Image (cartoon, grey):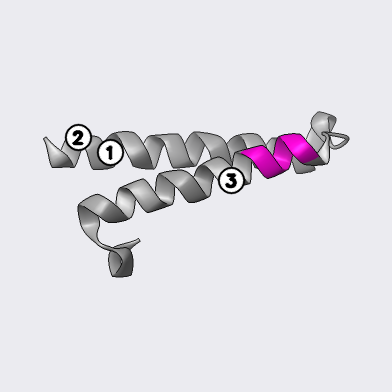
Amino acid sequence: MAESEVARLLKQIETAYEAALRGLSGLACYARHDFINARMQRIGELGHELSLYIGPEQR
């Protein structure tokens, strides 16, 4: 079960990161700072949750 949780968390991190990157480039280059900040905050939260499964040194 932990492996599927790790895979889920990694996918969520990837999705949030891609959203933040789209906010910085391309057609969405005028994204609001709070949108990008929220995505990056979520990545941090997911990273913390991930560290509960695999340990902080493995992140």
Whether residue 25 is visible, yes or no, is: no
Residue 41 on image: x %, y %: 59, 45
Task: Measure the alpha-carbon separation of dots 1 and 2.
Answer: 5 Å
User: Which residue lies at the image location 22% right of the left edge and 56% below the top edge?
Assistant: 54
Q: Residue furthest right?
A: 30
Q: In percent of the image, x 88 and y 35: which residue is there?
A: 30
The quadrant the N terminus occupies is: top left
Residue contact between numbered discs 1 and 2, judged by CB atoms under 8 Å: yes
Viewer-nearest residue: 27 or 1: 1
Residue depth check, mark 3 versus mark 1: number of the one nearer the observer: 3
* Residue at disc 1, secondary structure: helix
* Up/down of 26 relative to 48, above or below: above
**Against 28, is 25 above or below?**
below
Specify the amino acid type for callout 2: Ser
Structural distance between the alpha carbons of marks 3 and 2:
23 Å
Picture disc at residue 34: none
Magenta residues?
A: 34-38
Q: Amino acid at mark 3?
A: Gln
Query: Decide: marks 3, 1 in contact (CB < 8 A)?
Result: no
- Left or right of 10? Residue 29 is right
Asked whether residue 27 is in view, the answer is yes
Residue receiving disc 2: 4
Q: Residue at x 32, y 49 (%)?
A: 50
Residue assigned mark 1: 7
Q: Is residue 57 magenta?
A: no
Residue 41 in the image: above or below residue 8: below
Q: Residue at x 37, y 42 (%)?
A: 10
> In this image, 35 relative to 44: left or right?
right
Up the image or down, 58 lies above or below 13; here it is below
